[in-house]
Image (cartoon, rainbow, N blue to C red):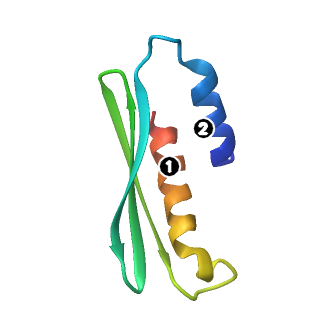
Amino acid sequence: MPVSERVKELHESVTEDTVYSIVTEIISNSEMVVVKATVSLGDRVFTGHSQATWGEGMMGKVALEVAETSAVGRALGFA
């Protein structure tokens, strides 16, 4: 499932009184980008990590965005 669909599903599944958040943190932004995403749903917390390399492949110019999106997708998958 694409990450955008996972985010949409999250928004549709929570009730008005549910406290939730998606927070990302750049762990490393050198040759290798490493991003940690944390999804909080009430008192439950789920994390996902991802990495991407600058300059590699078609997505090498947007390695940060690729790593962040993947990390969010992984955290939502765990949720």
Which label number is shown at residue 47? none
Quadrant for the C terminus in the image:
top left
- Please provide percent x and percent y for residue 60: 60, 82
Label 2, on which residue?
7
Q: Nearer the viewer, residue 29 or 78?
A: 29
Which secondary structure, mark 2?
Answer: helix
Q: Residue at x 70, y 81 (%)?
A: 58
Residue at numbered disc 1: 72
Q: Is residue 75 above or below residue 8?
A: below
Query: Does dot 1 land on a helix, a strand or a loop?
Result: helix
Considering only vertical position in the picture, is 50 above or below 31? above
Disc 2 marks a residue whose amino acid type is Val
Up/down of 26 relative to 75, above or below: below
Q: Residue at x 52, y 40 (%)?
A: 77
- CB-based contact (under 8 Å), mark 2 and mark 1: yes
Residue at horizontal 41%, vertical 80%? Answer: 32
* Left or right of 56, for residue 51: left
- Horizontal relation, residue 53 to residue 1: left or right: left
First in sequence: mark 2 vs mark 1: 2
What residue is shown at x 36% (from left), y 38% (from top)? Answer: 46
Q: Quadrant of the N terminus?
A: top right
Rendering coords of residue 23 (x, y %): 40, 45
Front-lying residue, 31 or 17? 17
* Residue 22 % position (x, y): 44, 40
